[in-house]
Each structure stands twice: as structure tokens, then as C-alpha cells.
Image (cartoon, rainbow, N blue to C red):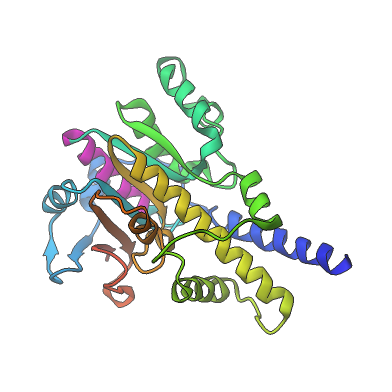
Amino acid sequence: MENDYRMKNVFYALFLSLFLSACSFLQDKKITENEFKDTEFEIISAHNKQKVNFDEFIDLIGTYDIILLGEKHDEYNHHLAEYFIIKALHEIKNINVVFEMLSTDKQNKIDTAKADKENIKPPNLAKAIEWEKSWRWKDYQNIVELVFYKDIKMSAGNLSKAEISTIYQGAQQLNGFVSTKNSVKEMIKTIIMNNHKIDTNSTENSTLLDMLVQIQQYKDRRMADIVVQSKEKAVLIAGRHHTDKRIGIPLHIQDFKSSKKVVVVIFGASEKEVEFAEADYFYLFK
């Protein structure tokens, strides 16, 4: 019993650190066209290793049914690019923007607020949609306001805290063919272990890692389900490990046997960190 109690405390401490790692400390400012034009970036296709300009990139990804945007949560340039990708796609397509930062139990709140958007002022928007405070509002404010006040569908994509707690207490393993392979789970485990420096020598930590891998996969399955079910072209904003073609949402979409076409875009800093198997396009900042 004492070990179970200690294990639970360790889990929640680590989960809290993982959850709060979404927070960052970017300056509060409005995105402008000039700022975007002044940003130095290059977009590389993983298929032919060639560079494409922004307009070509929008035309290319616009042909897909599901567009997965993999970010680092604390990078302002990633949010800048996401803003203008969504803006450009909205000008030519009906899109549904899905947020990892919103749990699906908030969808009714989001829909109710969206139906009354003329009466909801920007300072009140976070409260109206019950934005989770562990995701720093000012990091995503520009994107959320763009989606909320334009004629763009807005969807929550993540598990709720209650669902995560239930999984921790003991949930059935996910069914799948490619997403649930041991090689996929081991890669996810290695990423979590390295990012959070977890010592696997202890039995408790090993069990904890297995739980965190399971939660990661349940999150990926939920986001995959939301984008596959979308009637509009779905654009997902999520962490880059969630969108990774080797371990994340694309594998769960395969397990759904969906006929929808999927494209993955990963944001990064330089070509040195590019793994071409991870995505279809790499949006890199100089």
C-alpha cells in the first residue's frame, strides 16, 4: 500500500512536470504580416529534399485531408508560422483547427462560445472556452483568436485530466496493428526517459514509464480520432512527438484504415535536427 501511494505521488509529480512543460515565457504581442515577412525560414520536402516557398507549400499541403503541424510548445516562431499557415489555408479551404491544448470535454463550451462570438471580447475568450491554464494563453492567443473569430471550425483534441487519471488507475491496452508495436512503444519510452531524465533501474520508474507511454498513446489515439472524423479539412496543432510519422498520430490514423490523405509538417531550428522519416515537410528557422 505504501509503495502504491509513493508511486502515485511520483506519477502525479512527473505528470505535472510534463503537463506544465507546455508553459513557456514568450512576450505578449500581436502577430503582424511584416513580422512574418521578416522571418527567415526555409521549407524542405522530405520526399525530394528540395526547398519550396511558402505559397507553393500551402498549395501542396492544401491537397491533403489532414494536416498535422508538429511544434515545440515554447517556440514563438512555430506559433508565428502556424498562424499564417492557418490564415492561408482558410482563404482557400474550409478547415477545422484541432488543438492539443484543449481537452474534448471542453467542446460544448467551445461550440457555445463560438455561436455567441460577437458578444465575446478577446479579453474574455480564454475564460469562455475554458482554456487550460497550464498552457500559457499568451503563447496561443493569436492563433486561438484567429480561429475563433473567423469562420473556422474549432475543435478540442486531447484527453481530459479525469481520463488521464482513469488510464493511470488501469485501462485496457489500445488495439492496433502499427501504432501499438513494441518498437513504437520503446521509441516513445526512450523519448520520455531522455527528455525527463528518468532512471529506469528501479522497478517503480520502469512501471511509471510504461504508464506514461500508454497515456501518450491514448492522447495520440484521441487526436487521430478527432481529425479523421472531421467533416472539414483538419489542421492539428500538437507537439512534434505527437505528429511524428514513426511513433505518433499518423500510425493511429493508419490503424483506423482511413482513406483520408495525411501530411505532417514539423517545425524546427536547423537542418541538423531533421529526421526525414519524421515528417513530410520541415519548416526550419534560420
Determine the image quadrant of residue 272: bottom left
- Vertical placement of residue 266 versus 149, above or below: below
Magenta segment's dominant SS is helix
Is residue 36 shown left or right of residue 218? left
Is residue 3 visible in the rendered structure shown here?
Answer: yes
Is residue 173 shown left or right of residue 72? right
Is 11 covered by the magenta stretch? no
Q: Nearer the viewer, residue 48 or 203?
A: 203
In the image, farthest residue toward the right? 2
Q: Quadrant of the C terminus?
A: bottom left
Q: Quadrant of the N terminus?
A: bottom right
Is residue 77 visible in the rendered structure shown here?
Answer: no
- x%, y% of residue 43? 20, 61
Query: Residue shown at 66%/76% (left/top)?
Result: 206
Please provide the residue range marked out in magenta. 77-92
Q: Nearer the viewer, residue 201 or 269?
A: 201
- Vertical placement of residue 276 versus 263, above or below: below
Image mark count: 0
Is residue 5 shown left or right of residue 206? right
- Vertical placement of residue 242 versus 272, above or below: above
- x%, y% of residue 104? 51, 38
Query: Residue shown at 55%/46% (left/top)?
Result: 159
- x%, y% of residue 115? 42, 18
Q: Nearer the viewer, residue 176 or 277?
A: 176
Is residue 194 shown left or right of residue 35? right
Determine the image quadrant of residue 47: bottom left
Is 82 covered by the magenta stretch? yes
In the image, farthest residue toward the bottom? 201
Determine the image quadrant of residue 275: bottom left
- x%, y% of residue 61? 19, 51
